[in-house]
Image (cartoon, rainbow, N blue to C red):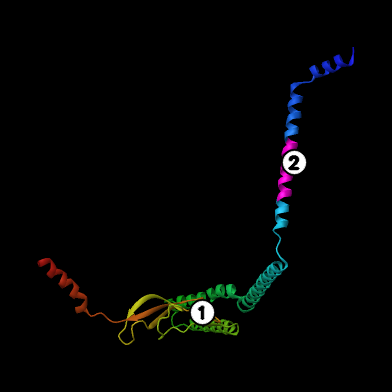
């Protein structure tokens, strides 16, 4: 068998799939070459568009100024967080501790209203001890800059007081606090909880209360 016949036999024995694989490989290589050319052209365009030394200097100055500004903001934020942690670190604990005072007041009120204990020496001693504990707790709070909010005979302040009811009283100006339902507290300049209070309002006379009803009857008759 000569060389030409051998070559023909080899060509005939080659599968069509291999020819397709060869074509796909050539196409992939062509795509890679085109992408590489595009990247090179983009790099060349960027190099052509290089900033002048003056423009680069201004850009660096701007970046440096922004960096320093960000660092200063972070420093201030850190200082503020540190001050708050030092000044108000026990805020949550203090707020929860107020429940102890409330429970002491409730216990005292329940004992004083107990018919069996009224006017007994045992009740007097118990109330005396409860008052001592209450005073000690208030003293500890004060040492830690936690103080009760003044309420009775003060004008209602929405930032410090929360009105729960109105009490008719002509001896006080309307909006004056005449009853304290629950004592409020401040921790330095921060509100721990508002005071729950009752405020005064003018007494409405019976005649004034009945006037709207009479007017309503007149309207019906018309």
Q: Nearer the viewer, residue 60 or 218?
A: 60
> Which label was assigned to residue 163?
none
Outermost residue to the bottom: 171
- Quarter in which the C terminus is drawn: bottom left
**Residue 123 on image: x %, y %:** 49, 81
Give the dominant element type of the magenta stretch: helix, strand or loop. Answer: helix
Report which quarter residue 87 is drawn in.
bottom right
Left or right: residue 137 versus residue 78 is left
Q: Nearer the viewer, residue 94 or 83?
A: 83
Left or right: residue 196 versus residue 10 is left
Mark 2–mark 1 distance (CA, rounded to whole Å): 77 Å
Q: Nearer the viewer, residue 48 or 214?
A: 48
Circle 2 Cα neighbour tier, 10 Å, few/some/many (<14 / 14–19 / ≥20): few
- Magenta run includes residue 9: no
Residue named by callout 2: 33
**Residue 4 on image: x %, y %:** 86, 16
The secondary structure type at the circle numbered 2 is helix
Circle 1 Cα neighbour tier, 10 Å, few/some/many (<14 / 14–19 / ≥20): many
**Residue 52 on image: x %, y %:** 71, 65
The secondary structure type at the circle numbered 1 is strand
Q: Residue at x 73, y 36 (%)?
A: 28
**Residue 145 on image: x %, y %:** 58, 83
> Which label was assigned to residue 185?
1
Query: Which mark lies nearer to you, 2 or 1?
Result: 2
Between disc 2 and disc 1, whose residue precedes? 2
Q: Residue at x 19, y 73 (%)?
A: 212
Q: Magenta residues, as a range? A: 28-41
Left or right: residue 216 versus residue 104 is left
Report which quarter residue 162 is drawn in.
bottom left
Establish if 77 lies above or below 13.
Answer: below
């Amino acid at each position: 068998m000569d060389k030409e016949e051998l070559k023909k036999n080899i060509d005939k024995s080659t599968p069509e799939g291999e020819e397709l694989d060869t074509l796909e490989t050539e196409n992939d290589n062509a795509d890679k070459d085109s992408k590489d050319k595009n990247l090179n052209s983009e790099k060349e365009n960027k190099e052509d568009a290089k900033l002048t030394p003056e423009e680069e200097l201004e850009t660096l100055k701007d970046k440096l100024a922004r960096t320093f500004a960000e660092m200063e903001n972070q420093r201030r934020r850190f200082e503020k967080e540190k001050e708050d942690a030092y000044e108000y670190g026990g805020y949550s604990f203090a707020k929860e501790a107020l429940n102890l005072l409330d429970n002491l007041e409730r216990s005292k009120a329940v004992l004083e209203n107990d018919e069996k204990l009224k006017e007994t020496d045992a009740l007097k001693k118990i109330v005396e001890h409860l008052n001592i504990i209450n005073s000690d707790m208030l003293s500890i709070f004060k040492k830690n800059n936690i103080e009760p909010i003044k309420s009775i005979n003060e004008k209602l302040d929405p930032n410090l007081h929360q009105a729960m009811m109105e009490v008719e009283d002509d001896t006080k100006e309307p909006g004056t606090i005449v009853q304290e339902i629950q004592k409020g507290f401040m921790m330095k300049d921060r509100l721990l909880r508002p005071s729950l209070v009752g405020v005064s309002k003018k007494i409405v006379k019976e005649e004034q209360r009945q006037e709207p009803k009479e007017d309503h009857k007149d309207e019906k008759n018309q």
